[in-house]
Structure formats: structure tokens, C-alpha cells
Image (cartoon, rainbow, N blue to C red):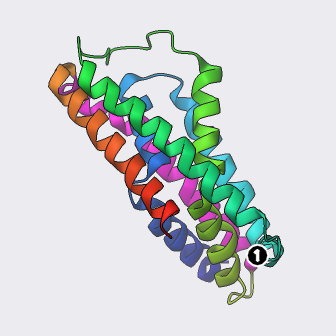
């Protein structure tokens, strides 16, 4: 069990560690302390579903559906361009520092729809979870335990990022810090969108 769980955990954590659209959104929600539990749970469960699908052999099926790749690619790029523009607008408008000592009543439904779009409309998520983790799991005798390790890494990462973000709260009491974060988020979203468009 140990020889399959640890490699699964390490691979999953390594793939998810790079800053991306989903991670940037979780970080932002964590700093605002808005719907953190549900955002982290949604991200982790989504990853778990995709990892399970990959280990179960759905990676090959996804590759055979010729319409699936282009749909995810263009849909994801359009959403990331829109979200990036919204982040740049927030950075430009600025204003008072966003609250870091509690939620400001943001819609849970809106936050969940956003994180679901950032997750399920990103083709790289499918490549990392369904295709890559699914194919690597075939090298281990206990594929289920390997998958469990990868799933556990998602839960550890997202809840660590979401709840650990509050440690940065003192920095983000300044409006300039939020402007900088919104700019970084916007650049991240547009960079990923550009990569999708020109891949």
C-alpha cells in the first residue's frame, strides 16, 4: 500500500503545485475568507472524480472523442479571457482594501460556478488527472491506492492553500496588495488562455 500511495501523492501534489487559474481563485477566496470550505471541497472532489476516471481507464475514451479537446480548449480560453479581464478591471479600479477579517456576503453560488468553470473548462486538468495520472497508475500493482494518494494530495493542497491564505491577511489590508494580486491573477488567466489558443 505504502509503495503505491506515496508515489500517487507525490505525483498529484507536483502536478497541482504550479500556480494556475484554479489555484489563484482559491488563494483569493482564502484571503477574503469567503466560502473557503466549499471552494476547497469543490476543487478537491472535482480532482478526485477526474483521477478516479483516469485510473479507471477513461483517458483513452477521452482521447477518442474528437470533439472533446476543441470544446474544452476554446471554452476554457473564452472563460479565462473573461475572468482575466475582470481581474484587470478590479486592479485598475482599486478602491478600499478588501476585507480580510471576514466574508462580505459574496454569493456561494457564484463562487462555486466560477470554480467549477475554472476546473472543468481547463483542458490541462484533464491532461494532468485523467490522462497522466491514469497512465502512470498502470505502472503500480495497486492502482486504487495510487489513486487514493493522488486524491489525498488534492485535499491537502486545496485546504492548505485556502485556509493558509489567511496568514497573508495583514499584507492584504493594503489596497496596493490587492491591486498587485488582481494583476497577477489577470496575467495568469490570460497566459493560460493564450497557451490554450496557440497550443
Picture layout, residue 101 above or below residue 7: above
Secondary structure beneath disc 1?
Answer: helix
When asked about the image quadrant of residue 133, the answer is bottom right
> Residue 46 placed where, x, y %?
68, 49
The one nearer the camera, 115 or 102, is 115
Drawn side of residue 146 relative to residue 26, left or right = right
Give the magenta part as a residue range. 143-172
Picture layout, residue 77 above or below residue 185: below
* Residue 138 magenta: no
Q: How many marks?
A: 1
Image quadrant in which the N terminus is located: bottom right
When asked about the image quadrant of residue 165, the answer is top left
Residue matched to label 1: 63
Q: Residue at 41%, 43% (x, y): give it.
A: 24
> Residue 82 placed where, x, y %?
49, 37
Q: Residue at 79%, 79% (x, y): give it.
A: 60
When asked about the image quadrant of residue 98, the answer is top left
Q: Is residue 26 visible?
A: no
Amino acid at each position: 500500500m505504502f509503495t503505491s500511495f506515496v508515489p500517487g501523492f507525490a505525483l498529484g501534489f507536483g502536478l497541482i503545485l504550479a500556480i494556475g487559474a484554479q489555484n489563484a481563485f482559491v488563494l483569493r477566496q482564502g484571503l477574503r475568507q469567503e466560502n473557503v470550505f466549499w471552494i476547497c471541497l469543490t476543487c478537491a472532489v472535482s480532482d478526485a472524480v477526474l483521477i478516479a476516471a483516469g485510473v479507471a481507464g477513461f483517458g483513452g475514451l477521452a482521447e477518442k472523442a474528437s470533439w472533446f479537446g476543441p470544446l474544452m480548449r476554446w471554452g476554457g480560453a473564452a472563460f479565462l479571457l473573461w475572468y482575466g479581464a475582470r481581474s484587470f478591471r478590479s486592479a485598475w479600479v482599486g478602491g478600499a482594501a478588501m476585507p480580510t477579517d471576514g466574508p462580505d456576503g459574496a454569493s456561494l453560488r457564484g463562487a462555486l460556478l466560477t470554480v467549477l468553470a475554472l476546473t472543468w473548462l481547463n483542458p490541462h486538468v484533464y491532461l494532468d488527472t485523467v490522462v497522466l495520472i491514469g497512465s502512470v497508475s498502470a505502472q503500480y500493482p495497486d492502482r486504487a491506492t495510487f489513486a487514493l494518494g493522488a486524491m489525498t494530495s488534492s485535499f491537502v493542497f486545496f485546504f492548505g492553500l485556502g485556509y493558509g491564505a489567511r496568514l497573508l491577511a495583514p499584507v492584504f489590508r493594503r489596497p496596493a496588495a490587492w491591486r498587485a494580486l488582481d494583476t497577477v491573477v489577470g496575467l495568469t488567466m490570460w497566459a493560460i488562455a493564450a497557451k490554450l489558443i496557440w497550443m
